Amino acid sequence: MRVLVVGSGGREHALVWKLSQSRGVTELHAAPGNPGISRLAELHDVATEDIPALVELARRLRPDLVVIGPEAPLVAGLGDELRAINLSVFGPGAAAATIEGSKAFARDVMEAAGVPTARRLPEAVAPCVLKADGLAAGKGVFVCPTATDVALALPKVEAFGGELIIEELLVGREISVFAVCDGETAVALPVAQDYKRIGDDDTGPNTGGMGSYSPAEIPGGLSATEVLDRVHRPVLRELARRGTPFQGLLYAGLMATDTETFVLEFNCRFGDPETQSILPRLDHDLFELLLGAANRELAADIVEESEDAAVTVVMASPGYPDSPRGGVELRGATDALEPDLLVFHAGTASSGGSLVAAGGRVLNVTGIGRSIDAARERAYAGVAAIEFPAAQYRSDIARVAVTHEA
Ligand code: AMP
Ligand code: GLY
């Protein structure tokens, strides 16, 4: 079977790596991919925003499955265009992807489906959270405990244009729960913890994610299946009722407070870097799972996960997230795909026979071990073996989990 993966990040490298282990997969393609992915798949130089060129590529390759990684092509309708030429696609169409593309739409669906989320407030008065409605690559949300924060955030959030959403500020612990969905049914993936802030101890600005670990506990004591019953399945039913069924990965970003588990956001695709810690723990054929969802015949009630733990540390360029400075040469274990150490490429490029940093988040180093502690040690030993001058990375990924385990 032939598979095409759309995207070029660490998430897509992890997807390609796991798909390369599926029995049925004989041919892998990626558009545009990256130097790490090029070891496992044939690359096609087509940007993820170039919908017509991606459709043309798919028309030519006739893959048995297309997996769309990032949100932008999903929200732009790539899934619809590929289904229109009779391809099996893992990833929702534009209408269902609006669950990520518009926070106002997501709130509307949650209200109709009876899913708990933060209350909307009439005025921007602290404490509150200000959100731009549309896609903002994680930069359109401003948590404002004080009036000064509100005054600083208002012009920034208004600069995005579109609707301004003001929510009550919830305090609790965050976790993301992913479900593979075929439009009607859903199955939970292993749970992973993400680290959003750039600095140790959750300091500094928000990023796309600086690390992850799995397995992780859902704060508040719910199991992943219970979360699916309360959150994902009601949302799937509501989207199907509206005539826009969701086939793909429904990502719920949750906040557990003392009293309730609220949804903060939905994403319409795999999380990055959560996926890099989840997929190595999957004791399940990924191709079968994703193809089942794409063909509306998801057979699995449960996805088997291994006993091993995985910890992923993101190595980012200096200046990330505001103004990353790329160009430095990378050396060392940048090609590791070993049983207990995986280095997934994100913003890397080949230049004159060398590997160079070419983006904000550059490498994702995943350690595997019998415990979180062992996986964490392996991941940081992997980081230490990589020469990446002035790299930024957090030194506390999975530290809390280690403490809890002890
Ligand atoms: P979102 O893109 O909506 O998930 O928001 C990004 C981040 O902002 C979340 O991961 C939370 O840390 C924070 N956040 C969003 N909404 C709220 C809220 N209502 N209360 C507290 N924090 C929030
Ligand atoms: N790691 C957060 C995200 O993928 O949106």
Image (cartoon, grey):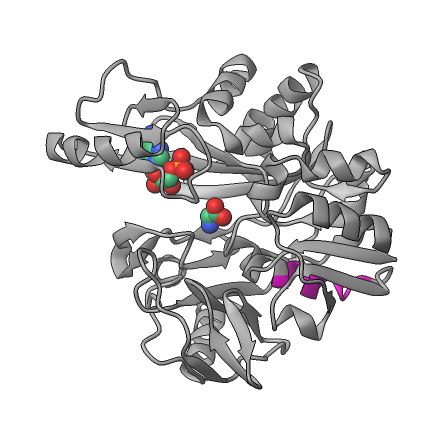
Figure quadrant of the N terminus: bottom right
Q: Is residue 177 left or right of residue 390?
A: right
Residue at x 80%, y 61% (from the top left corner): 22
Compared to 110, does 318 lie above or below? below
Compared to 68, does 257 lie above or below? above
Query: Residue 112 is drawn in which quadrant?
Result: top right
Q: Residue 103 lies in magenta, yes or no?
A: no
Q: Is residue 171 left or right of residue 174?
A: left
Residue at x 68%, y 32% (from the top left corner): 93
Could you tell me what secondary structure mostly forms the magenta stretch? helix
The spot of residue 135 in percent (x, y) is 46, 36
Compared to 230, does 188 lie above or below? below
Query: Between residues 147 and 281, which one lies in front from this camera angle?
Result: 147
Q: Residue 20 lies in magenta, yes or no?
A: yes
The spot of residue 296 in percent (x, y) is 81, 34
Figure quadrant of the C terminus: bottom left
Whether residue 406 can be seen here: no
The spot of residue 385 in percent (x, y) is 45, 85
Query: Residue 79 is drawn in which quadrant?
Result: top right
Q: Is residue 94 left or right of residue 105?
A: right
Query: Between residues 238 and 47, which one lies in front from this camera angle?
Result: 47
Q: Is residue 252 left or right of residue 27?
A: left
Residue at x 76%, y 55% (from the top left corner): 4
Query: Between residues 78 and 280, which one lies in front from this camera angle?
Result: 78
The spot of residue 194 in percent (x, y) is 43, 52
Compared to 181, does 358 lie above or below? below
Q: Which residues are magenta?
A: 13-22
